[in-house]
Amino acid sequence: MRTLWRQTRSFSSPVQLLMANQFAINLAFYMLMPYLAAHLSHGLGLAAWAVGLVLGVRNLSQQGMFLIGGTLADRFGYKAPIMAGCLLRTVGFGLLGWVDNVPALLAASAATGFAGALFNPAVRAYLAAEAGERRVDAFATFNVYYQAGMLLGPLVGLALLVADFRLVCTTAAVLFAVLTLLQWRALPARREHAEDRGGVLTQWRTVLSNRPFLLFSAAMTGSYLLAFQVYLALPLAASDALGARGTTVTSGLFVVSAAVAVAGQLRLTRWAKRQWQPGAALVRGLATMGLAFLPLALTPPGSTVAVVASLVAAVALLAAGSAVVYPFEMDTVVALSGNRLVATHYGLYNTFSGLGITLGNLVIGALWDFAQRHDALWLAWGALTATGLACAASVAALARTGRLVPRQPQPVAA
């Protein structure tokens, strides 16, 4: 904890505020979202299709609007989208607890999703600009706060849920309202290279013409699919092996994942910086994420203890690999952008990752069903391992051919 505090204090006040901001954002988000489906289905009595629609609209409005959010941040500065996103979350989370009809719930869900699309690219672009040459360290520290919010959010939400789901929503909304006011008062306005941002279509053409960035985005897509398996394949495996007790094990896996990131992020980043160049750190982190699923592929079916041990090993390795990858990944996006239109680059990058998660989960889900019917779950784990190794090989090829070398800053194309 002292190390985290010293590291945090070594950055400027805006960077510290952005880190505290992200902790509070995740704390509020994860105190509510894990329990929303149960509230909609059991509390409000909605049909399963309606629950899926409400949750799907939130995901679609966030993943599909990242590019818009990044574009707005580059055009109007980083502070305004961050504040607007927090204000939208205030309204959206407040509505989720107090409305009971599907149209209003869809509007609230869309607002919470678009809020994420507004502040995520802006926060990362602001952090990168303010941290300067210390981007890797800044993103590593930022991720500790990010994961800590994920770790504590569900616990706080569970405690509040004893009283009422409306209390959970109201508390989350109040947190976002406080964040909005705090950033209005304390976060300095910042806009990078406003003189050459051009029009919206010009911004998009500039980003879409950045071939090294597009190749890197495509190569990294699989890593987001792997990280998402904490929500899909690993809970399915726990449920298959343990039945009703699988839910308890799944909760434990979330705790292990966040705890590894919180406890190990700064140490792993310092060690990786000493040992490897950024490209090599990315390759080894991605390979670790892929190999995390290998213990499950090799675990014989029917042994509950072995399955649980393999699940814990998988989630720990997955979290460690992600911790190695994240700060170098975020730094590489900035480097490949040439420090121009950074938020727009982040927006498109997040769109790539969202599409990868959606399409990849469809494939993994279909493969899981096939593997279950043929008593061959090793096929699903093998596919995930192969995905991680393929990502690592792709990034290694980009590094070997010089495509991860930072671009010289270029003006926006006319």
Image: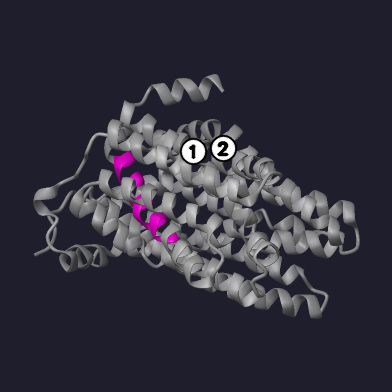
Q: Which residue is identified by label 1?
A: 23
Report whether 123 appears left or right of 241. left
Quadrant of the rendering where the C terminus is positioned: bottom left
Quadrant of the rendering where the N terminus is positioned: top right
Observer able to see residue 132: no
Q: Nearer the viewer, residue 301 or 288?
A: 301
Q: Quick one: SS at disc 2?
A: helix
Report whether 71 appears left or right of 178. left
The residue drawn where x is 35% and y is 34% is: 182
CA neighbours of label 1 inside 10 A, class few (<14), some (14 to 19), many (20+): many
Question: Where in the figure is residue 241, as x and y percent of width and height?
Answer: 85, 61
* Residue 132 part of the magenta segment: no
Contact? badges 2 and 1 (CB < 8 Å): yes
Up-down: is 197 above or below 331? below
Q: How is the image coloured?
A: one colour
The residue drawn where x is 71% and y is 58% is: 294
Observer able to see residue 340: yes
Check disc 1 and give the amino acid type.
Phe
| The label number, if any, that marks residue 148 in the structure image | 2
Question: Where in the figure is residue 296, as x and y percent of width and height?
Answer: 76, 59
CA neighbours of label 2 inside 10 A, class few (<14), some (14 to 19), many (20+): many
* Residue 115 part of the magenta segment: yes
Q: Which residues are magenta?
A: 113-128
Check disc 2 and give the amino acid type.
Ala
The residue drawn where x is 53% and y is 64% is: 390
- Report the Cα–Cα distance between label 2 and label 1: 7 Å
Dominant SS of magenta comes to helix
Q: Nearer the viewer, residue 60 or 234?
A: 60
The residue drawn where x is 48% and y is 67% is: 104
Q: Quick one: SS at disc 1?
A: helix
Instruction: Choose the circle earlier in sequence order: 2 or 1.
Output: 1
Question: Where in the figure is residue 5, as x and y percent of width and height?
Answer: 48, 22
